[in-house]
Image: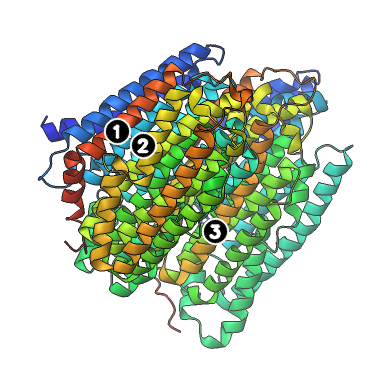
Amino acid sequence: MRDYSLFIPEYIAAAAAIGIVAIELIWPRLRKDVLAYLTAAVALAWLGASLAYLGRAPKEFMGVLVVDEFTTYFRALAAGIVFVTCLLSAQYLRRRTREASEYYGLLLTAGAGMSLMAAARELLTAYLALELLSFSLYILVGFFRRDLKSNEASLKYVLLGGFASAMLLYGISILYGIAGDTTYAGVAEALAGRSSDTDVAAIAAFVLIIAGLGFKVSAVPFHTWAPDAYTGAPVPITAFLSTASKAAGFALILRLFTSAFHTDPAEWRWLVAVVAALTIVFGNLVAIQQTNFRRLIAYSSIGQVGYMLVPVAALGYGDADVAHAATAALLLHLTGYIISTLAAFAAFQAAYDRTADDTIPGLRGLAETQPFLAMVITISLFSFAGLPIFAGFATKLFMFQSAALPELMWLVGIAVAASFISLYYYLMVMRQMYLFDPPEGAARFRVQPALWAAAAALMLGVIFVGAYPQPLFDAADSAASALFEHAPAAQVRER
Amino acid sequence: MTLEEAQGYVLLATLATPLVTAAILVLIPSRYRMAHRYLSLAAGAVMLGLSVYVFAAYQVGHDPIQMTLRWPWVENVAFLGEKGVSLYLGVDGISALLTLLNGIVAFGGILVSWKIDYRPKDFFILYLLLLTGVYGTFFALDLFFFFFFYELAVVPLYLLIGVWGSTRKEYGALKLTLYLVAGSVLIWIGIFAVVREAGLGTFSLPALWEAGQSGALSPAFQKTFFPFFALGCGVLAGLWPFHTWSPDGHMSAPTAVSMVHAGVLMKLGAFGIIRLGIQILPQGAEFWMPTLLVLGTIGAVYGAVGALTQRDFKLISGYSSVSHMGYVLMGLGTLNAVAMTGAVLQMFSHGVMTALVFLLIGAIYDQAHTRDMKDFGGVAKVMPLWVIGYVIAGLANVGLPGLSGFTAEFHIFVGTFRSYPVFGALGIVAAAFAAAYMLRLFSIVFFGPLNPRWASLRDARPVEVISGGLLILSILAMGLYWAPFVERVSGTVLHLPGVAN
């Protein structure tokens, strides 16, 4: 059925994206931070419109998109990320460019792409939504046209991204060859009933699709673009990349793997487990050697993606209850990770606006010059490392607990050991901030109010999720239920 | 409200006092230095009072777990069922005694931190967070919160030692943090396995204890996963050969942190072995305990010999701590009621004694800026009070009758002799070494000709006299009138699964 009222949040985002560009055309001399705050207001409207769908029965749009609690969860996340990114960008962009409207417009389209990735239940629709997000990001990463590093990052990202999209499409086409259908439900049914002479084709399709999606979430060995893109992009876009693009990737993965692929888990679960192990070990080990804060966060977020792939592997090894619990716990951890990352970047942005130095030693003595920012960065990093009372402890504990199947204990063990390694490099950042005196001539400075408020609110969020996870866990659980309540009845394939 | 419920709120108040105070300190600007100090001291006094109450009000001869309070926290979501995670507080005889220990040491630590001038606000916030973690671990009857608070106690240590420490502080802080977190990795894995295998959808410790004792956790499973808990917690307890962080960490740490760290935090490790190892996995414990006994005995002898070769006061006490924690692990390893009671008493005894020693070392280091005992001589002439305190702590360390160390070690040796005579004998050898290193220190530092360089040393200051007096009082109390201590602990130990009377 064509129910066009299902996409009001996306209409808001898209209309505002065009509107913002139009505003700058009409009033070219408008202060650029006004555009940022305008976009932030749009994000709030978008959030409100998304939440209006809560409590309604799930509705499909022509079998290719669905608006249920899962979609709502990611719409709200997307709106929240865009909101914070706008606050981070306001002064930063105002000082560096005279044309900012495309930047804010693209942020909105990227967010809409993320929502659609969560809503898609058909392979090509999912692909289109993913490309909407990716194209917006390619331009955003290279937004500073005259900055060589920004250009290099964007070029690398475009080339490798195009390659990954090709692999994904190839995988989709093979899958279509097996199933004769591109809807998730149709694929699930076909995979359940396929004969064993399609084994090779099925494995090829899964490998290609996992590779393509692995690129989008920067899983090892498809991660090579991430560190360069993170360092070359405008700082707020680094925050956006490490939150929105990963969240969107996992939105797509979760819906795809719990519906289309769940009838044939034996052919892909080992691959996900191996990619998860590689990503965890590699991301955390390479992070140790980094001297640039943004590169450090890039590798650390690669490690985090590895942790989040552990419950994805559990989707293939466990029964429906395990899969449900793993999905809910993954959503919880993903959200905690996003809040922690945005908190870290809000504080880092404020420090960067002052020092224009993104190396780790550049944070030297921050505890003296700006103790609040040092505290926020410390809390976010402790949250990444999984220490209480911060979000990372509770969310990681629940996520690994949900995935601790006998078959996956080895992977959980690797993940926990890697969080121990990660603590080492986070401590190295804290060492610079707390153990050393600031460089000569550095004085105490004030943080601009919008960033201060964002950092404080996100820090409280990190502590709240860590100390009392029930409300967020409930939301994540009901979002996860949406994937399982209306799952197709097809049985898991007999081998 | 029944008395039981009301007492549950006492535990909550004890736990909330340092946490709320820390939150208030965050909000007070750092220029109000005295406000930070007085508020922390007030919190310390409240904690001391509440801890004494918890110990005194614990009723001997009743159900071992008392003063329970349960608030649902996270439930009916994902794999968590009814009462999945709850803020479930309560004490048994063991944790009641350790609560008292924490109250005494924490108060003393805040008093001697009065003189900290470098960023006192941050120091007290982190210190209070550390105390919250310690109290929480003692009170938690929920595995989630047990580990939550256990880890919370580790979080502030890096900064506390790295910023306010002394000798090789960065190295000591990093080594200590990494060792402790490496231990936690094993505990994480153990928790995942146990909660999954029990399949109850809850983290409630009494429910998991029940599962472990009723056979819901198979013997093979228990044997596989007991080492995860025992080694993971053992790192914090200074288990040989994973003890090396302890002397280095103590050497680097500021006075108050050394006091809490050697005095209370290392006991969390031994406490964890009881709570997680013996109580959840009794059959695993039975299988592995002889190994723990051997490692504990090695630690006791090795630590004592190590202390004999050191010259830095703090290193001597650091190795002595390894030795004494070795006694604790030895006592636990026998799974014999007398020796285990002794082990728990030793946790308290070593806690107050070692806190006193670190307090006194801090007092002299602040003036002399050296801790090498060869630099000193004849200090008794200028610092009589200080020397008296040190002698009492040293003799308690050696196990002189009338002081707490005797009560504890006597129980351990008697119990160990009953089941493992050889190890009992080795323990006594270690005690002889303890006498040797203590008397060596006494003779070199306290007596002999006074080095004129130290003629201007001041004696212990009032804050040190008050907090030291409190610790000496505890040492004497346990040495002279041990009944209240012994009956609380032994009543609980007898209820532990697999413990022979």
On the rendered structure, is A79 left or right of B127?
A: right
The three-letter amino acid code for the residue at tag 3 is: Ala
Closer to us: mark 3 or mark 1? 1
Determine if residue B137 is in view. no
Percent coordinates x, y for residue A149 in the rendering: 85, 43
Q: Secondary structure at mark 3?
A: helix
Residue B352, numbered circle: 2
Q: Is there a contact, CB below 8 Å, between mark 3 and mark 1?
A: no
Check disc 2 and give the amino acid type: Val
Mark 2 lies on a secondary structure that is: helix
Quarter assignment of residue B353: top left
Viewer-proximal residue among B114 and B149: B114
The image shows residue B470 at horizontal and vertical percentages of 33, 27
Q: Residues within 10 Å of mark 3 (few under 14, many from 20)?
A: many
Please state if B213 lies on the left or on the right of B453 as rendered.
left
* Residue B474 numbered mark, or none: 1
Q: Which residue is located at x 50 percent, y 76 percent?
A: A266
How far apart, in angstroms, are the residues tagged by discs 1 and 2?
7 Å
